[in-house]
Image (cartoon, rainbow, N blue to C red):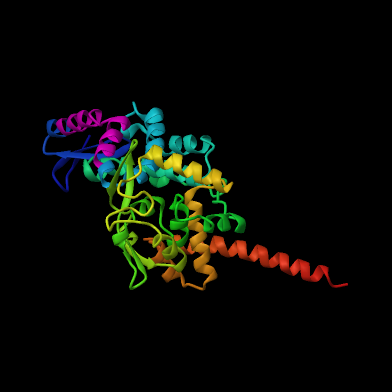
Amino acid sequence: MYFDKTKGLWREQMTIGGKRKVFSGKTKKDVKLKILTAQHEQKQLPTFGATALRWKEHHQDMVEPGSWRSYDAPLRRAIQEFGLRRLDDIKPGEIQTWINNLGFAYKTACNQKTVISEVFRFAIVDEGLDISNPCDQIRVSEKLSRTTRRALEDWEIAEIRKTKADEFLLAPLILYTGCRCGEALALQKRDIDFDRKVIHICKAVHHEGNQPFLGRLKTEMSDRHVPLLPQLEALIIQLDLAEDDYIVSGPELLTYRALAYRWERWCQAHAVRFDRHSIRHAYATALLESDVSVKGAQAFLGHSNYKTTMDTYTHIREKFLDAEAEKLRGHFGQIG
């Protein structure tokens, strides 16, 4: 402890909670009291697990159940690893090493880091704790493997287009509108303007366990109008639907088990095996093949982020370039 003649105060430097702090007071007793108070408050810092559960309680109601599923598993992993540790005791290096050793692909590793970072951000911003966010110093390796969604083959798209009006219409509904699955399940006849040839996508179906309910769209940009294509109109006009009926399920929403059952039956009937989001990707491919601009595609797909649309188009263009390269090889293979 030393006396600062300029300020007329006693001062003491100490490291508390990993941070170097200076305590000042008119007397030595004042300085010691401040140090003891800071040390006591530091000991009262919550554990990562307790903070994570409060973050979950606060955050879960702010996102749709479908989106929350991407948080759930990484949150459980983080609590299992760091749950009993005080927030200030968790260092960037150990989080970095732990994420590196998980063996995840790039996107999953990024998601894991994001969830841990959000818990610390909640503690700092919402609960006012004087700590740093260790995830600010963490970088996910660009060398980690990256998975890309398989593009549908032409014959698979042809099978979707063969779907009859008396079948399960989820696949063609996604193919001809670019809807997310929940958006397609929520489409009602009254959402279709047959005069203007447009469909209003304004809600989505979510499932709480097995039970369905109507909820918000993924983002504000998801509320949109898309063209009513003739192929889809031809299917819908064959259905005996009331204005409030759902296109794929009639008067009632599908439970999660009913959705899985009917989807499996449709896949078996058409001898295909792909996930429903791949059909939405096929719609994006059709937009590019039709020379729809990136901004137009963003509007039709309901992307809130322009970069998401650009990344989607870039991936599709790479597929096109591969096909064009094969044409070039074939051309030169026929010469000489």
Q: Position of residue 273 (x, y in %)?
A: 56, 45
Q: Point out the residue furthest to the right here.
A: 336
Residue drawn where x is 49% and y is 36% of the image: 97
Nearest the eye: 165 or 285 = 165
Nearest the eye: 185 or 111 = 185
Residue drawn where x is 36% and y is 46% of the image: 67
Q: Position of residue 153 (x, y in %)?
A: 60, 56
Nearest the eye: 36 or 121 = 121
Q: Please state, as top left, top right, bottom left or bottom right, where the C terminus lies in the image.
A: bottom right
Identify the image quadrant of residue 14: top left
Identify the image quadrant of residue 308: bottom left
| In magenta stretch: residue 50 | yes
Q: Position of residue 276 (x, y in %)?
A: 48, 50
Identify the magenta region. 33-58
Q: Is residue 282 above or below residue 15?
A: below
Residue 133 in view of the camera:
no
| In magenta stretch: residue 207 | no
Q: Please state, as top left, top right, bottom left or bottom right, where the N terminus lies in the image.
A: top left
Residue 166 in view of the camera:
yes
Q: Point out the residue furthest to the top here.
A: 84
Q: Position of residue 2 (x, y in %)?
A: 22, 37
Q: Most prominent secondary structure in the magenta stretch?
A: helix
Q: Give the total number of marks visible in the rendering.
A: 0
Nearest the eye: 15 or 313 = 313
Identify the image quadrant of residue 15: top left
In this rendering, would 49 be left or right of 333? left
In this rendering, would 3 be left or right of 150? left
